[in-house]
Amino acid sequence: MPPSVSLCKLDGGGVPMYNKLIYYLYGGHGVMWIADGWQDYELLSCGGGEKLERWGRQILARPDPQAIWEADKRSKLWRQANARYSRSSTGGGHWEKNDLPQSWPIRYKELTFQVKPMNFKHTGLFPEQAANWDFAMNAIRQAGRPIRVLNLFAYTGGATVACAKAGASVCHVDAAKGMVAWAKENAKLSGLADAPIRWIVDDCAKFVEREIRRGKTYDAIIMDPPSYGRGPSGEVWKLEDSLYPFVKLCMQVLSDKPLFVIINSYTTGLAPSVLGYILHLLACQRFGGKVTWDELGLPCTESGMALPCGATGRWVSE
């Protein structure tokens, strides 16, 4: 059995190749989920601790801790950047902009998002998550029944918009009021202003605890928790310590016929198999089904390789 699949029912199934890419390097190979369906986004080049990206017509250079190989940043390609995020030796950083709009829309298939370069290098969208959007939309559309999705640490709503576009009702939860407002904007841009989306500004753990007391359930859960944070009462969130009990808590709001659970992590020290192990213990052993886990990646035009962009674990019912 391939190492990135856990079957609670050992039926000999293989690795689902949905949004998978096998790439070869020096006679070896690796497997990851690749977000290769973009038209408005492109990873042009990466290396030297940075990545060069095309967001619509704008080209940005941003730091990336995974791109540790060399890159010729004096080349014509890298000189095309409209803006570069430069880190400060004292912490933080700033954008060096050259004729860059404050914000602009980009499309992914039937979805539209507003991009806004912000502090700490971010743009409000993680394009590698398109691999998970495709997975979730496909599962919802094939379910043949109404699906209720809980999106936790939901940020600017990429997964919320994707699931709603596929026909699900969605509960979007994030502690940052500004991010929830941005997510509403993305929903409106995607033609979902009147979609059944519940917008919640709240601490995710506190919200889940209240939903348990209310007896509310969901058919699918998506979560993208931070590496570190603090709760409303000063509680410390550290992914390595907090993730397992949080996922265990969330299992209590799954319906009797759950469809899927997705966990994302950008913590470089957390292997994808850790997410798979958690889902195997907490979802697979209770509901059956199947767990898969892998890196997420973006295809790089210049090298033909894929830049790793974090880890994902998925549980799906069978």
Image (cartoon, rainbow, N blue to C red):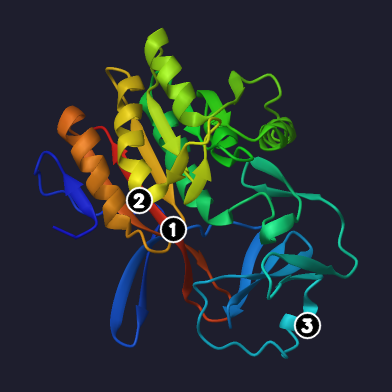
Label 3 vs 2, first from the N-terminus: 3
Q: Mark 2 and mark 1: span between their CA atoms?
A: 9 Å
Question: Which numbered disc covers residue 79?
Answer: 3
| Residue 146 can be seen in this image | no
Disc nearer the start of the sequence (2/1): 2
- Image quarter in which the C terminus is found: top left
Residues at marks 1 and 3 touching, judged by CB atoms closer than 8 Å:
no
Q: Residues within 10 Å of mark 3 (few under 14, many from 20)?
A: few
Where disc 1 sits, the SS reads loop
Q: In the displayed structure, would residue 81 be above or below residue 260?
A: below
Query: What residue appears at the point 39 percent right and 11 percent down from the top-left corner?
Result: 213
Say which quarter of the image contains residue 19.
Answer: bottom left
Q: Secondary structure at mark 2?
A: helix
* Dot in front, 3 or 2: 2
* Amino acid type at mark 3: Arg
Q: Is residue 72 above or below residue 177?
A: below
Circle 1 Cα neighbour tier, 10 Å, few/some/many (<14 / 14–19 / ≥20): some
Circle 2 residue: 240
Spot occupied by residue 196 in the image (x, y as percentages of width and height): 59, 18
Residue 222 seen from this side: yes
Which amino acid lies under the numbered mark 2 shown in the image of this protein? Glu
Mark on residue 267?
A: 1
- When asked about the image quadrant of residue 41, the answer is bottom right
Q: Residue at x 60, y 40 (%)?
A: 155
Q: Is residue 99 left or right of residue 73?
A: right
